[in-house]
Image (cartoon, grey):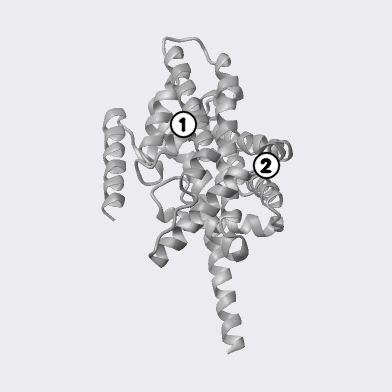
């Protein structure tokens, strides 16, 4: 709880700083939207294209671990998890619930099923870095170009390094023989060992061949939302330039500094999109609109599905009793 309050305080302080520094007004952020048809089109993407590519990507990883699930089931789990994940301070809070739901469906494959969620994020992060690096040459040349290249290069190096660490057999061997007498801690350690072993032994090359198109199309769908949001504000920024900037923002916002990345994400939008001449008020508005579309709309649908499932399960129990 203290950590949650601390992160919430940081989010509020950052929000106040942005509002006072750039004289932002909520009514203006909404009023600045001039082409609502682009906004409405963007709002459809997370629950259609993004969900389609994401669920199929996850389905590939599960199948490689000998776990068969229907697309509809994975789609429903993803939406419900996004809704439930709102209680966590990180933008990736829904992943914890995805792990919980998929492992509850496959109790005989503890760690194996859950590892696919982490692997999915790992491979998606690498594609994000690759997208940014390939698109950097298309940004306008400026004084900040060098610092941006250094930032992207550093983030990419850290991402690759962290993933090599996680899938290292040597690291796994350092602790895989450990045992703990406490029953609860012993179960937790055994689960971590199973999860890590699954990540170490996962067939990454086969997975990349089978899922690369889904991974790439998923990232395209996310960047398309940002592109359309800016179009709704009247800014027709070339798509390839979003390719260079948005992945960096998405990666940096994964760091759980504030609740849902609020404040931090807006600051990054202001900084990076200022390189393209976008005013601060537009960048903040686009950031908040993008968050509402990518997080709140799928979460709302996930909440409806969760409530309907809860009601149905309750009726089934009452019928049995």
Rendering coords of residue 194 (x, y %): 55, 54
Question: How dense is the environment of label 1, judged by Cα within 10 Å: few (below 14), some, or many (20 and up)?
Answer: some
Q: Quadrant of the N terminus?
A: bottom left
Q: Quadrant of residue 255?
A: top left
285, above or below 146, in the image: below
Label 1 to label 2, Cα distance in Å? Answer: 29 Å
Residue at screen point 51% across, 51% down: 95
Residue at screen point 65% across, 50% down: 55
Q: Quadrant of residue 125?
A: top right
Rendering coords of residue 257 (x, y %): 35, 40
Q: Nearer the viewer, residue 252 or 266?
A: 252
Find disc 2 in the rendering and name its residue: 203
Look at the numbered discs 1 and 2 and tell me whether their residues touch, using CB distance below 8 Å: no
First reached walking from the N terminus: tag 1 or tag 2: 2
Residue at screen point 50% across, 26% down: 156
Q: Quadrant of the C terminus?
A: bottom right
- The residue at the far bottom in this view is 321
Residue at screen point 49% across, 40% down: 171
Q: In the rendering, which numbered label is found on residue 249? A: 1
Figure disc tally:
2
Closer to us: mark 1 or mark 2? 2
Q: Is residue 196 left or right of residue 7?
A: right
Q: Is residue 31 visible?
A: no
Secondary element type, mark 1: helix
Rendering coords of residue 149 (x, y %): 48, 17
Q: Quadrant of residue 253?
A: top left
145, above or below 64, in the image: above
Secondary element type, mark 2: loop
Question: How dense is the environment of label 2, judged by Cα within 10 Å: few (below 14), some, or many (20 and up)?
Answer: few
Q: Is residue 245 visible?
A: yes
Q: Nearer the viewer, residue 7 or 189?
A: 189
């Amino acid at each position: 709880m203290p950590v949650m309050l601390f992160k919430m305080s940081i989010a509020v302080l950052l929000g106040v700083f942005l509002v006072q520094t750039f004289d932002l007004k909520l009514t203006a952020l909404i009023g600045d939207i001039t082409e609502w048809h682009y906004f409405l089109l963007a709002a459809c993407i997370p629950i259609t294209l993004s969900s389609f590519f994401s669920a199929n990507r996850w389905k590939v990883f599960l199948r490689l671990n000998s776990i068969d699930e229907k697309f509809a089931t994975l789609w429903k789990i993803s939406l419900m998890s996004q809704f439930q994940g709102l209680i966590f301070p990180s933008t990736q809070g829904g992943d914890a619930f995805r792990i919980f739901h998929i492992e509850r469906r496959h109790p005989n494959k503890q760690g194996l099923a859950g590892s696919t969620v982490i692997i999915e994020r790992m491979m998606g992060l690498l594609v994000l870095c690759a997208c940014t690096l390939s698109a950097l040459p298309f940004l306008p040349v400026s004084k900040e170009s060098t610092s941006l290249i250094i930032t992207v290069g550093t983030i990419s190096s850290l991402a690759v390094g962290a993933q090599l660490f996680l899938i290292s057999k040597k690291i796994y061997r350092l602790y895989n023989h450990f045992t703990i007498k406490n029953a609860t801690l012993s179960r937790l350690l055994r689960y971590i060992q199973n999860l890590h072993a699954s990540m170490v032994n996962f067939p990454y090359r086969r997975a990349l061949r089978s899922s690369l198109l889904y991974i790439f199309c998923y990232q395209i769908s996310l960047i398309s939302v940002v592109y359309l949001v800016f179009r709704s504000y009247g800014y027709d920024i070339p798509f390839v330039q979003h390719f260079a900037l948005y992945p960096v923002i998405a990666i940096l916002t994964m760091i759980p500094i504030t609740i849902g990345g609020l404040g931090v994400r807006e600051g990054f939008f202001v900084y990076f999109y200022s390189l393209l001449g976008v005013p601060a008020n537009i960048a903040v508005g686009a950031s908040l609109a993008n968050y509402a579309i990518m997080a709140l709309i799928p979460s709302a649908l996930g909440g409806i599905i969760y409530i309907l499932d809860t009601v149905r399960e309750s009726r089934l129990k009452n019928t049995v009793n």
